[in-house]
Image (tube, helix red, strand yellow):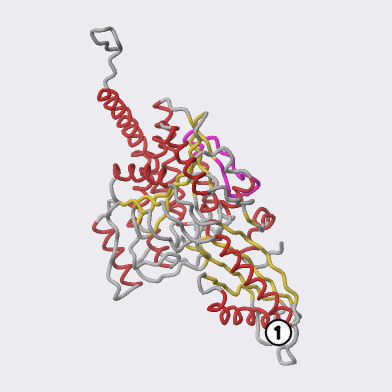
Amino acid sequence: MAFDSAGEMNHNPLKTVNSLQKTEMKLVETTRRHWQPLRTDIVSKFNALWSNPELGNMEFAASGILCDWLEESGFKVERGVCGLPTAFRAEAGEGGPAIALLAEYDALPGTDNAAVAHRSGTGRAAGHACGHNLIGPANCGAAIAAALAAREAGLAGRVVVLGTPSEEIVWGKIAMLGLGAFDGIDAILTSHGDYQNGAISRPCQSVMNGEIVFLGESGHGGGTRRRNALDAAELAVQSLERLRAHHFADASLEHVLRVAGHIPNVTPDEARLWFTARHADFERAKEVFDFAIGVAGQAAEMTGVAFRHQFIAGTRGYLPNDTLAHALHSALELVGPPRWTDEGRDFMRALAKACRPEGGFTLDDGIRLHTEGLDPYGQDDGEASWRIPLGRVNWAFPEQVPLHNWALTALSGHEASHPGPLMASEALAIAAVRLLADPAAVETAKAELTGRVGGKALGEPAFGALETMRHRPGSFWNASWVE
């Protein structure tokens, strides 16, 4: 310790700054040293999950692979957390703060494809057309590296992995949030594929969704058709399409007809409509959704059939958090953009041409902090972001390859997709360790969240179908569930 000539302690700000910089650099180096050997494991999990795509709340193989890996890496894992068979919570470390990374691993029905640059179905029930086979392993790998680095550096705090099923129906995280799986978490970090690389601090769409069941009476289709459930469903859809411009031109209301009968000469006694409403404002999304339910009820009354609504879930869009976004962006600048190979670019170029023959090829190869605009998608971690600070890293797919499309399934199963989530994984690990080392930054993120919420009453997380998802998830996907 240095003193001046008068015997007073000599505070040298430059030395203090240099000391902090050296400590910071050492933390980063330690984290990257632990992350680097995990690349092979991360990639092997990418492939394992892609090879066995599973529908929401039925991801038994995927969640098992990730839980086994986390346990082998020193995490204490609670499988089936909150009574949800494919959800889990894994922890390493002690004390606070608690930094959570989210793992997604469900696939989308009807999007199966081989890892080739043309349409080639595999016959599987689902496909990873949103890249969740990449998200789960990338985020788990980040957590493992962060936990190892934190332990080596002697940092207090916990690294938590929340395994969250059924994101594609914006259900899993909302249910886990409402059932207590997120309790004790101070900040959340995650990643997702999109059309740009960088840290995200901007909103996305709020989402409400549920299924309408119309119940009539079966009979010979050649006779007088009364109490036809399909009539009610079709009338509801037609009415909503005619009313769209008048009542909800500002929102998105989409549907699929899941049950519509079996053969023309048997009047359908059951029809099912699955509605999804989206809007930037959660209250407006709910208003549009409730309007649609009301129209469906009137259609049932006019056609003389019974009617019930089975609510699935509702989520707010992302609440931006600049504090966490800046932390992630800083980590991304250290890691650098995805390191695509020439062969990988060639595959993506061929895939882009298959999707958009005249559309060219656009692939973001930079890194930015994204704070402007509104993403057109909904995420179930949006609801969590209004209660716990959340930061997200994006990695880029080619703009000509649509999300939720067979081509994204093809890309997610090809090594051309790996550089993006690997970039995200390493950056998440660095950011998590930095947050453990700087609890004040976590408190700043919390204060920012409080300011953005502004005292708004959020209510309880909105989800239904709990007994179905816990005990009979197959009935949800074959459209026979009753709840």
Residue closest to the eye, 128 or 325: 325
Number of labels in the image equals 1
Residue 57 is situated, as x and y percent measured from the top left of the image, at: 59, 55
Q: Which residue is drawn at 39% across and 35% down?
A: 434
Q: In the image, is residue 356 above or below residue 158?
A: below
Residue closest to the eye, 139 or 85: 139
Q: Which residue lies furthest to the front in this view?
A: 6
Q: In the image, is residue 404 above or below residue 222?
A: above
Residue closest to the eye, 321 or 380: 321
Q: In the image, is residue 276 above or below residue 20?
A: below
Q: Residue at x 27, y 54 (%)?
A: 366
Residue 304 is situated, as x and y percent measured from the top left of the image, at: 76, 81
Q: Is mark 1 on a helix, strand or loop?
A: loop
Q: In which quarter of the image is the C terminus?
A: bottom right
Q: Residue at x 33, y 72 (%)?
A: 354
**Horizontal side, residue 257 vs residue 379: left or right:** right
Give the residues drawn in magenta, as a range: 69-89
Where, by quadrant of the figure, is residue 147 drawn?
Answer: top left
Residue closest to the eye, 345 or 183: 183
Write down the residue under mark 1. Answer: 266
Q: Quadrant of the N terminus?
A: top left
Q: Which amino acid does label 1 sit on?
A: Val
Residue 186 is situated, as x and y percent measured from the top left of the image, at: 51, 38
Q: Mark 1: few, some, or many residues within 10 Å (few <14, many ≥20)? A: some
Residue 135 is situated, as x and y percent measured from the top left of the image, at: 44, 51
Q: Does the magenta stretch include residue 471?
A: no
Q: Does the magenta stretch include residue 79?
A: yes
**Horizontal side, residue 41 vs residue 363: left or right:** right
